[in-house]
Image (cartoon, grey):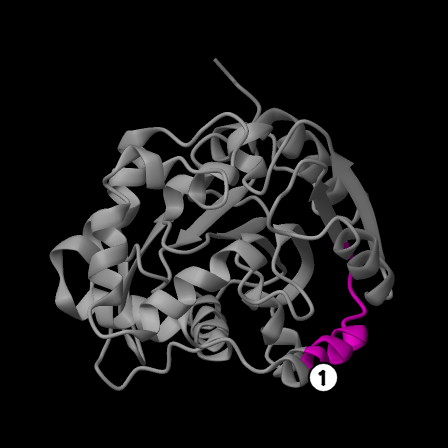
Amino acid sequence: MPKIELSSGTIDYQDTGGDGPVLVLCHGLPMNEKQWRKVVPLMNGYRCVLPTLPLGGHRRPMAPDADLSQRGVALLLGEFIERLALDDVTLVLNDWGGGQFLVSAGKAERVARMVLVACEAFDNFPPGPAKAGAVVCKVPGGVRVLTWLMRIPFFRHHRSGYGGMSLRGIPDEIMDEWFAPASRSRAIRRDFAKFATSAPKRATLLAWSERLRDFDRPVLVVWATEDRLMPREHGPRLAELYPRGRLVEIADSATLVPEDQPERLAEVLTGFLIETGAEPVRHVDRA
């Protein structure tokens, strides 16, 4: 897997390559690029770039003084896009919504459009059921306790936690991979705790949200009808907030739409890309 050295440390990323329009797909806490494993093969004609951000599932610890706050990670994402010289990027978020803070920080020059898939928004950082986990992470040793609990099927699959993020169920081997780095590395547990406890106050989050009105490029908001983490009303509210926003709801899905409805998500995403000028590159078979 390729890696790149950024100001806060080294991160891994997946890159399908090619000369098609660029999609940068971001994951949640403490996930990695595997969150998109069902969708990427369906995006023929596009270059999919998937950074493994330091949200707790990353394989390499960041520098001890790294800013891993919500905004800090968003700026790190912007640095990643700039360092790879990616232009006309379609930024795709699911679960973690902090990538939107590139807009409020004035660092979204390379982002041509956004796709917000059942993600944190407004003052929903972290989402309701995850707030208890954030409290645990504030306690010394809390992340270690959390990773230990996630080995127990009752906690792992409970509907008020990760078990409620997918109607289909997240495979155990994927969950094992997401929690393995923090279970093995004290430094990664430090990073995990930094991010998990970094949500700004409600007034700050709402002030940042107001700045999103300045993003005058196309935005597709994809909301899941069975989501337990992201309020149903946030979908239309987000679509109205962005000057060129539009809403699509996907039925029979919880937060992790790439897990529950990958084909439908790929269909909606491709349609939006084509409508907004990001046509896939089709290679002619000359054999």
Q: Left or right of 71: which side holds 76? A: left
Residue at the (71%, 44%) spot, across then down: 223
Q: Is residue 116 visible?
A: yes
Report which residue position mark 1 lands on. Answer: 207
Front-most of residues 233 and 104:
233
Q: Give the amino acid type for the residue marked by disc 1 in the picture.
A: Ala
- Which of the 4 quarters of the picture holds residue 121? bottom right
Q: Alpha-carbon neighbours of circle 1 within 10 Å: few (<14), some, or many (≥20)?
A: few
Is residue 32 covered in magenta? no
Counting the numbered discs, the total is: 1
Residue at the (57%, 67%) spot, across then down: 125
- Which of the 4 quarters of the picture holds residue 113? bottom right
Q: Where in the figure is residue 118, as x and y percent of width and height?
A: 64, 48
Front-most of residues 48 and 279:
48
Residue at the (46%, 52%) spot, across then down: 27
- Which of the 4 quarters of the picture holds residue 217? bottom right
Q: Where in the figure is residue 278, as x and y percent of width and height?
A: 70, 47
Q: Where in the figure is residue 40, as x and y percent of width and height?
A: 49, 35
Is residue 8 placed above or below 186 in the rendered structure?
below
Is residue 254 placed above or below 128 in the rendered structure?
above
Is residue 209 covered in magenta? yes
* SS of the residue under disc 1: helix
Residue at the (28%, 71%) spot, across then down: 191
Instruction: Tell me which secondary structure the magenta stretch mostly adopts.
Output: helix
Stretch of the chain drawn in magenta? 206-219
